[in-house]
Image (cartoon, rainbow, N blue to C red):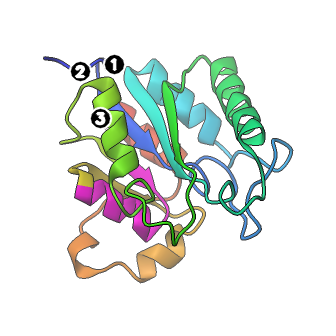
Amino acid sequence: MPGRVGSRGLLILDRDGVINQDSRDFIKSPAEWLPLPGSIEAIAKLSRAGYTVAVASNQSGLARGLFDRGALRAMHRKLRRLVEAEGGKVARIVVCPHGPDDGCSCRKPMPGLLLRLARHFDTSLAGVPVVGDSLRDLQAAARAGGDPVLVRTGNGERTLRALPKELQHVPVYDDLAAFAADAVHG
């Protein structure tokens, strides 16, 4: 059965450090949720080009009590509104609400979030780009059968310097806008 995805297929993005600025103190409110330059336009461009854009994000701030689900929903409404204003769409957002020691299967580097998206869209992750800035994003993509892609924003530079041998083949882009330009025109 074919997946329920756009003409160019599914594309999965990490959130903090890829779409918006990251913070060691966590992003706790819509006011703190600030898009990286060009990221909103990049998502809209990918969406308009026929990609089904989904977001998979660890959000341990929920488990830590730093913000609640209402604040998280408000951040995601802001993301969706900004992308829609540029003529695009974020099709689905999934999050892991657990802390690092909770032992769940959804917290990246585990593949659970990505596999949940595959089930939702009724598609395989083979050939699906999974764009992240952290080693755990790349590991989750590889474990789920997707194609890991690294951006230099957020933790990307640090991740690039410490890539394990099995991930040194991953494509690297300066930011989400550079990836989108290549994905749409490449």
**Residue 53 among magenta residues:** no
For residue 134, above or below residue 54: below
At x 38% / y 41%, what residue is drawn?
182
For residue 4, above or below residue 99: above
Q: Earlier in the sequence, mark 1 or mark 3?
A: 1
Of discs 1 and 2, which sits in the foreground?
2
* Residue 34: % across, % down: 76, 47
Cα separation between marks 1 and 2: 9 Å
Determine crowd level at label 2: few under 14, some 14-19, many 20+ residues with C-alpha closer than 10 A. some
At x 46% / y 34%, what residue is drawn?
54
**Quadrant assignment, res 117:** top left
**Quadrant assignment, res 142:** bottom left
Residue that mark 3 sits on: 118
At x 70% / y 34%, what residue is drawn?
73
Left or right of 76, for residue 28 = right
Query: Please, what secondary structure does the residue beneath circle 2 have?
Result: loop
Tell me which amino acid carries mark 3: Ala
Tell me which amino acid carries mark 1: Gly
The image shows a total of numbered marks equal to 3
* Residue 31: % across, % down: 86, 44
Q: Which residues are magenta?
A: 131-143
Residue that mark 2 sits on: 3
For residue 88, above or below residue 15: above
Q: Which mark is residue 6?
A: 1
**Residue 133 among magenta residues:** yes
Label 3 close to label 2 by CB (< 8 Å): no
At x 67% / y 34%, what residue is drawn?
76
